[in-house]
Image (cartoon, rainbow, N blue to C red):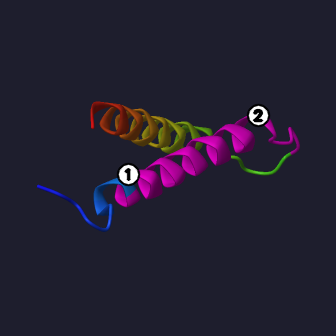
Amino acid sequence: MNDPFALDLTINLLLLGFGGAMFAGSLFAYFGRNFREEEFYAPRTLFLGTIGLFITLWTIASIVNN
């Protein structure tokens, strides 16, 4: 089936941007944290970074498959 407006590609690229931003933001938050007495949520940051990496890899595989 033809997709005249390239909506499949558009959704995949939006997910790629979202997942990449989620992964990069979590990565920068984890490695750029300051070691003062402020509370840092390392488990949450690592969990969200893992989710972002999963979304990114899944989207790349989806784009390559099509």
Name the foreground residue: 32 vs 12.
12
Quadrant where the C terminus sits is top left
What residue is rendered at 38% in x and 41% in y? 59
In the rendered image, residue 25, in percent from the top left (x then y), is placed at 66, 48
Lower sequence index among marks 1 and 2: 1
Residue 57 magenta-highlighted: no
Quadrant where the N terminus sits is bottom left
In the rendered image, residue 50, in percent from the top left (x then y), is placed at 47, 35
Name which residue type carries label 1. Asn
Name the foreground residue: 66 vs 60.
66
- Residue carrying label 2: 31
Work out whether residue 41 can be spotted: no
In the rendered image, residue 58, in percent from the top left (x then y), is placed at 35, 36
Q: Which disc, if any, is residue 12?
A: 1
Range of residues picked out in magenta: 10-36
Q: Is residue 11 left or right of residue 27?
A: left
Q: CA distance from mark 1 to mark 2?
A: 28 Å
What residue is rendered at 56% in x and 49% in y? 22
